[in-house]
Image (spheres, rainbow, N blue to C red):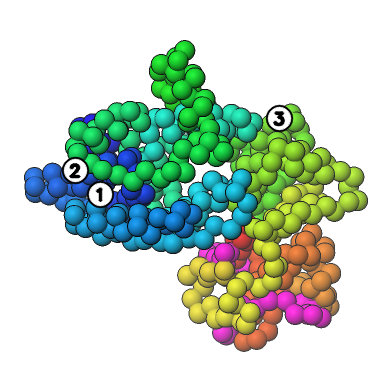
Amino acid sequence: MSERFRQAMMPWRDRSAWVIAFSGGCDSRLLLELAAEFRRSLLNSNQSAPTLKAIHIDHGIHSDSGQWAQQCQNWCAALGVPLKVHNVELAGARQGLENLARQARYRVFEQQLGAAELLLMAHHQDDQAETLLLRLMRGAGVRGLSAMPQSRAVGAGTLLRPLLNETRASIEAEARLRGLSWIDDPSNADTSFDRNFVRHRMLPVLAERWPDGSTRLSKIAELQAETNILLSQYVQADLQQLLRDAGELDLAGLVQFSTERQRVVLRAFLASFGIEVERAELSELLEQCFAAPDRQPEWVFPQGILRRHRQRLCFSAPHDSKPDGMATPILWPDLATPLALGESRLIATFGGEFCPKGEVSIGWREPGMRCQLAGESHSRALKKLFQEWGIPQWRRQQVPLIFCDGELAAIADFAICEGFKGDGGWQLQWNASR
């Protein structure tokens, strides 16, 4: 097992740190030993090696959890590995305790993991089989049945499961061979929890008929992961084809797809904003996307608001306003340098028609603002211009206005005002936030 672990870890030697998710159970106890052993071998052969540290999550569920945390401290100290203990509070019904505990753990991991750090978790083949069966019973699709990936991004770093191809039996045998002791959490035997029910009731029955059942189930998860990757590539190609300015989704193009294709593209569009919805909600949303043209449906999510506008599906932040921290005009002293405006930015390239005069600054629309566009004889209200250009009402406050010595000179990349247009100027481009 040491050699298999070494092979799994070789590509990750350049990380600044290996961080063990250390519960003190058999799996993570062996993982800690293997990581410390491999690191020592690198140093003994005069090779560079990442620092090694550990994180222990105390959920506070069991009365002995404090003693377990201290025992984890002792084991880590014996190996010279610094351990950080995080206490989390779980508020909710017992039936949702598993999920709450998992969410709490991953929140800590995301907050604590630094750039270029590698989080090592001790999930193994039997855990993978359990995850697959759980998701199967919950009606998961291809992505869900991919179960747990070998590696993925977490916070600013990466998560790796180097023991994913090992069985629970082989891990326990290796731990005993090394004379290791570990913590046995009695809750792991409580079959009122879904995962424990699968572990103690379902998998043993399957093993009576198919002794290598966990291996087979893990293989299914691997095949589903491959299918999911391929499907994602096709879906992303469809999504890119339908994305318009500011990341809006072209509904006129989407309606040309089959219903199944519409559904996966819409799911991918929502996922790009961190929004996940159940299948029934997705179908309802899709139906409203193609409702009567005079309707303007909108959907509110924690991440922001989704609206239909002129055959486009538009996403905006929860509070549509000037970019955070930029409520007052800011200077743009060097047009050759792109100017960041929250999640969007202004870019100026030489060879356009915008000819600034004096100090250039950026501001945002105020009530009653007017502008005389280049070539026109009178001024018009910005509200009317925005309506004419089809800018949704919720996005108008985010449109940057370019001022020269306090005088309105241009409206993002939509128009140039009278007196500021000519040859040999700048070409403006506003990369709106999605």
Residues shaded magenta: 343-371
Q: Which residue is mark 2?
A: 38
The residue that disc 3 covers is 260
Asked if residue 16 lies left or right of residue 382, the reply is: left
The spot of residue 396 in percent (x, y) is 74, 68
Estimate the x, y position of residue 227 in percent, counting from the top left. Answer: 52, 27
**Viewer-side residue, 361 vs 18:** 18
- Whether the magenta-drawn stretch holds residue 369 is answered as yes
Would residue 145 be found to the left or right of residue 301 on screen? left
Amino acid type indicated by mark 1: Asp
Label drawn at residue 352: none
**Callout 1: few (<14), some (14-19), or many (20+) C-alpha neighbours within 10 Å?**
some
Reply above or below: 350 against 220: below
Mark 1 — residue?
14
Identify which residue, 404 or 193, lies in the foreground: 193
Secondary element at tag 2: helix
Decide which of 331, 65 is in the foreground and name it: 65
Closer mark to the observer between disc 1 and disc 2: 2
Q: Quadrant of the N terminus?
A: top left
Task: Name the residue furthest top.
Answer: 209
Decide if residue 84 is in sight here.
yes
Question: Does the stretch in magenta take in 366?
Answer: yes
4 is higher (above) or lower (below) than 21: above
Dot placed on the residue nearer the N-terminal end, 1 or 2: 1
Camera-near label (3 vs 2) is: 2
Q: Pick whichever of labels 3 and 2 is earlier in the sequence.
A: 2
Residue visible at 79% across and 65% down in the picture? 393
- Residue under the image location 26 percent in, 60 percent down: 82
Q: Nearer the viewer, residue 79 or 61?
A: 61
Badge 2 density bin: few <14, some 14–19, many ≥20, Cα 10 Å = some
The residue type indicated by label 3 comes to Glu
